[in-house]
Image (cartoon, grey):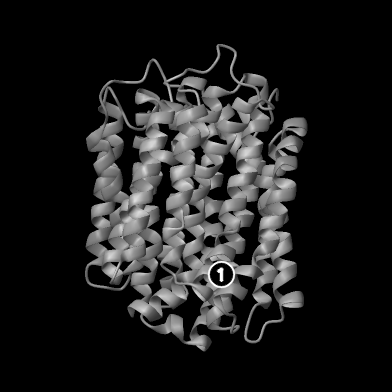
Amino acid sequence: MGDHAAPADGVRLGTPAGRAVVAAAVLGSGMTMLDGTVVNVALHTIGEDLDASLAELQWITNGYLLSLASLILLGGSLGDRFGRRRVFVVGTVWFAAASLACGLAPTPLVLIAARVLQGVGAALLTPGSLAMIQGAFAHDDRARAIGSWSGLTSVAAAIGPLVGGGLVQYASWRWIFLINLPVAALTVLIAQRTVPETRDPHAPRRFDALGALLAALALGALTYALTEWGGPLAPWAGAVAVVAAAAYVIDERRSDHPMLPLGIFANRTFTAANVMTLVVYAALGAVLFFLVLQLQTVSGYGALRAGLATLPITLCMLLLASRGGALAARIGPRLPMTVGPLVLAGGTLLLLRVGPDADYWTDVLPGLVVFGLGLALMVAPLTATVLAAASDEHAGIASGINNAVARAGSLLAVAALPAAVGLGGEEYADPAAFDAAYGSATIACAVLLAVGGVVSWLTIRDPGL
């Protein structure tokens, strides 16, 4: 378990070392993505078991996304400075400890607090997973390695409802968190034994602690304002969010060691890809949040059946995600990043058929298949485009920015949409009220996805053009 470095020309994808790097990265990031989706299928049961309100259920999802999105840039910077593998391993151990706390939580508030801590661990390991690939692989193999990573980690996110459904129905919702412990142990073992250490030799020796605090305050206050919209403190939280966001930008401009080097956004492709990420992942997070609750609350599905219902997404990602990356490498990313979100929008509209006594084969399956095809077409090209637009030494921060944007999009959508479609209080348990809200939310998500496709067509340019 030495601190071995990558070969001068990088490891190759088909070698044992290359496969080990991908395996460690997939296990670690897949674990965090799994927990980002597996909770959705358990929310209904958690709400009944812990007597949680809709706002508390939102915070069980959003507490995790909040700390992850707020601190992931810091996690990327720490990896660039101290070593991507080292910070990745620390984050994995932290994530496992927080998962144990989640599994033992006796009240909604304790569970929310543990989920926030879980997000801190995810913020440390998530950027390192992709940065390890970017830093360790030979240049010619990076695109294919990223494609493999994208496909396999997306599968982890997609199987979340399936795994969660089985555990909730036949064991306990607590096991959706406790299952992380053996996965984390295997991840650490592989990483420590086989993954070469990489770092940015030019990374600053100091860290922007004020920037991290302001980012967390801005995103947290905005999330509270959206979740508690209509409450007496919501306007004040919104004002705090605006002030903190403005102070964050000022701090990043003035700091000689910024957490977010604003110059990285001078690259038009990098900026455009992140705008597209924000819009599309807002819709993706909200679709999965509402769909799984709709299947259980309105359509009468049990937890396992609701989880199994989303299996077509898993199969599409498993079979086609790497091909989406290969297609983008051949024809350029603009077309896949345009068509993918549009196909996703079409699949989302088909999911409007999910209602009372929904038939799986005619009302659920068609939408999920189309949805999965769009996701498989989009994910790998998007990730590769973001990383290709940044220099190698900024791999950690580039990965962190894109992950932060994706999580922030999901966070804000899950916070805002329930109130926007008239859902609040205990209404999530009322089938008629939830069904009406689901229709409005689904249409809003389809519009966001279509906007993402248009943004890609107007702003993304293929290499050499």
The answer to whether residue 340 of the structure is visible from this angle is no
Instruction: Please tell me whether mark 1 sits on a helix, a strand or a loop.
Output: helix
Which residue occupies the foreground of this view, 385 or 233? 385
Identify the residue under disc 1: 166
| As drawn, 48 above or below 375 | below
Which residue occupies the foreground of this view, 393 or 415? 393
| As drawn, 301 above or below 272 | below
Q: Position of residue 406 (x, y in %)?
A: 49, 48
Amino acid on which the number 1 mark rests in the picture: Gly
Which residue occupies the foreground of this view, 282 or 2? 2
Question: What residue is drawn where x is 47% and y is 56%?
Answer: 36
Instruction: Report the side of 408 relative to 446 (left or right).
Output: left
Q: Position of residue 105 (x, y in %)?
A: 30, 66
Q: Position of residue 286 (x, y in %)?
A: 51, 63
Quarter of the figure with the C terminus? top right
Quarter of the figure with the N terminus? top left
Q: Residues within 10 Å of mark 1 (few under 14, many from 20)?
A: many
Q: Position of residue 271 (x, y in %)?
A: 51, 36
| Extreme-top residue of the structure | 8
Question: What residue is drawn where x is 42% and y is 83%?
Answer: 427
